[in-house]
Structure formats: structure tokens, C-alpha cells
Image (cartoon, rainbow, N blue to C red):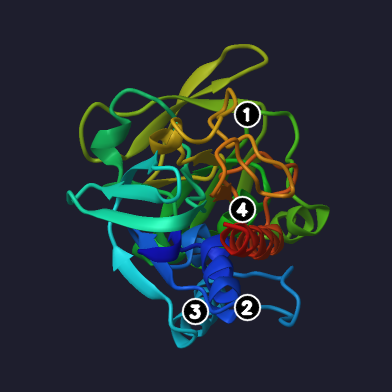
């Protein structure tokens, strides 16, 4: 029996583990993929206190090192459900294991949103990528398109422009939504062309991904764009499907919890990008992790 089981090892989950261990609570951290969450895909983080600029992977390494140094236990497993057993919670995993804890913190974050087009799965990893840091080098001196217009998309486009021959930024709106500073930086890159009011209409049925079909929203004009690769940065989807029995979810799948990180189930807390919130940044995720851990410790102490 653990004091606290934390599902997800992004900034929120790792911070929660640090705070819980500092309170002398036993902690099990369950993560299905890579420690650090979505931040590991960010080429540059400039909004985290203490660092003028740091790569997401480096910042994540600091989180992980501190968490392990505090003595948290970790397992690489996919959580499939949480059952409320009254005085404790039972966390089930895809491997058939069950872990028991007095409290659970859900910090599963969110996954990359897909375009939702036919044949998309055919090209993921073989022409379609969600991470310029991971895959940008494969397209050195080649032509790529990037779908999206927010901060993450613009950062990805800037990184791609440093090695690609040509970068098309495809944005469905008539304006970019990312920070002005990022727009200005991108605007100075001579190998970047921004296609506003445009959406990806179709993908090739089979490999290779050597073109995409685009459609202008204003007049419906459809045309093919020759490319060597496609990067998608159109937001995230919360990974809360497994927790609907213990946590209320809104229409978009985010956990219905406020700044106190409390859920409808006593002893179950939620932190980070998987909960309802107006701002999703690494700083707000770590803040959630601290709040959720303190709340969980208080819950255990009052049992």
C-alpha cells in the first residue's frame, strides 16, 4: 500500500512526487511512455523561472533527477482504470497489475491532436510528425509543411526553418494565434511561407507522403502542395478516458476540477494539462502538482 499513487510523469506529476516525498509520503509514479511529458518535445522553454532559456528535454531531466533523488518509486505501465475502495484506491494497469494507494493524483496531461483525415495513420512516423525536435533533422534541405498557428506551432516552424529548404505554415484562421515575438521571428525567415485561411483537405492514400491537398476556406479553392514531410501542431487532447468512473469530465474530456485540484471522489486529485484550466504552461502544471500533492497529503493525514 502506497500513500500516494501518481498517474503520469510530466511536470505536474513529477512536481507532485517531489512535494509528496518531501512530506515523507510513500510515492509510486506510473508513466506509460517518456518521463517529462509534452515538454520534452519543446525545442526551447523561455517562460520557466530560473532559466533564461532551456530546452524542454533538459528541463525535464532536472525534474526527473530531483524526483528520483527524493526516493519516489517508478513503474513504466499504462493505467487502465481507478477503483474507489473507500479507505484506499486501486489503480489497474494494462499489464494486469493492481496498485493500492491511500490517494491518487491523476496527471496524465494530453496527447497531440490529429488532423482526423483518412489515411492519416498510414503516414504517422512515415511522413507525418508531431515533433520537430525529434524528426526535423530528417528533412534537412527538404520542403515541409506545418499545420498550426499557436505558440508551439510557431516554435516548431522556426526550428524547421533552420534546416529545411522551405517551410509552409498552414493555418485555418486568417491570422496566427501565437505570440507576436514568435510571429516576428518567423517573418524574418526567407524560407517560410504562411498560408492563412487554409486547411489540409486530404492526404495520399499510400506512402510516400509527397504532397498534401489544401483548401482555401474563403473560396473553397483546392490544390496540391508538393512536400517531403508534414508536421502537425494543432493542440492537445486530454488523456482521461480511463478515469470517467472517478472523475467528472467536461465535453472536451478535461477533468472537472478547479485550482484546488479536487475531484468528485475523495482521495482522487487531478493536476496539470488534463484538467479544466484557462492557461496550460509548464509553470501552471508544476503549480498544480504542488497543490495536488499538498491536498493529497492533507487528505491522508486526516484519515
Secondary structure beneath disc 4?
A: helix
Is residue 178 shown left or right of residue 100? right
Q: Nearer the viewer, mark 4 or mark 1?
A: 4
Q: Quadrant of the C terminus?
A: bottom right
Reading the chain from its start, which is encountered first: label 2 or label 4? Answer: 2
Which residue carries the number 4 mark? 152
As measured in the structure, the alpha-carbon distance from the residue carrying label 2 to the one carrying label 1 is: 30 Å
Which residue carries the number 3 mark? 67
- Asked whether 39 or 255 is in front, the reply is 255
Reading the chain from its start, which is encountered first: label 4 or label 1? Answer: 4
- Which of the numbered marks, if any, corresponds to residue 134? none
Which residue carries the number 2 mark? 54
Reading the chain from its start, which is encountered first: label 3 or label 1? Answer: 3
- Asked whether 222 or 95 is in front, the reply is 95
Give the percent coordinates (x, y) of residue 50.
Answer: 74, 82
Reading the chain from its start, which is encountered first: label 2 or label 1? Answer: 2
Q: Residues within 10 Å of mark 2 (few under 14, many from 20)?
A: some
Which residue carries the number 1 mark? 172
Q: How many marks?
A: 4
Amino acid at each position: 500500500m502506497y500513500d500516494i499513487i501518481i498517474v503520469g510523469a510530466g511536470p505536474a506529476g513529477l512536481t507532485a512526487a517531489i512535494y509528496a516525498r518531501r512530506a515523507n509520503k510513500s510515492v509510486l509514479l506510473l508513466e506509460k511512455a517518456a518521463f517529462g511529458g509534452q515538454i520534452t518535445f519543446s525545442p526551447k522553454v523561455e517562460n520557466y523561472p530560473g532559466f533564461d532559456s532551456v530546452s524542454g528535454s533538459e528541463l525535464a531531466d532536472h525534474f526527473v533527477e530531483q524526483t528520483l533523488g527524493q526516493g519516489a518509486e517508478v513503474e513504466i505501465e499504462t493505467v487502465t482504470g481507478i477503483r474507489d475502495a473507500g479507505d484506499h484506491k486501486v489503480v489497474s494497469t494494462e499489464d494486469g497489475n493492481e496498485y493500492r494507494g491511500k490517494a491518487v493524483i491523476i496527471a496524465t496531461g494530453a496527447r497531440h491532436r490529429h488532423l482526423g483525415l483518412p489515411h492519416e495513420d498510414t503516414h504517422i512516423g512515415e511522413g507525418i510528425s508531431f515533433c520537430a525536435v525529434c524528426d526535423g533533422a530528417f528533412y534537412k534541405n527538404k520542403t515541409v509543411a506545418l499545420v498550426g498557428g499557436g505558440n508551439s506551432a510557431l516554435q516548431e516552424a522556426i526550428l524547421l526553418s533552420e534546416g529545411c529548404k522551405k517551410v509552409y505554415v498552414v493555418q485555418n484562421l486568417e491570422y496566427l494565434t501565437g505570440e507576436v515575438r514568435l510571429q516576428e521571428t518567423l517573418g524574418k525567415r526567407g524560407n517560410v511561407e504562411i498560408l492563412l485561411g487554409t486547411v489540409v483537405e486530404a492526404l495520399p492514400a499510400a506512402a510516400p507522403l509527397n504532397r498534401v491537398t489544401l483548401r482555401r476556406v474563403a473560396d473553397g479553392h483546392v490544390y496540391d502542395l508538393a512536400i517531403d514531410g508534414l508536421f502537425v501542431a494543432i493542440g492537445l487532447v486530454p488523456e482521461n478516458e480511463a478515469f470517467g468512473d472517478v472523475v467528472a469530465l467536461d465535453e472536451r474530456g478535461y477533468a472537472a476540477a478547479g485550482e484546488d485540484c479536487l475531484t468528485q471522489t475523495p482521495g482522487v486529485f487531478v493536476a496539470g494539462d488534463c484538467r479544466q484550466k484557462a492557461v496550460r504552461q509548464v509553470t501552471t502544471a508544476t503549480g498544480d502538482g504542488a497543490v495536488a500533492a499538498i491536498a493529497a497529503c492533507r487528505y491522508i493525514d486526516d484519515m
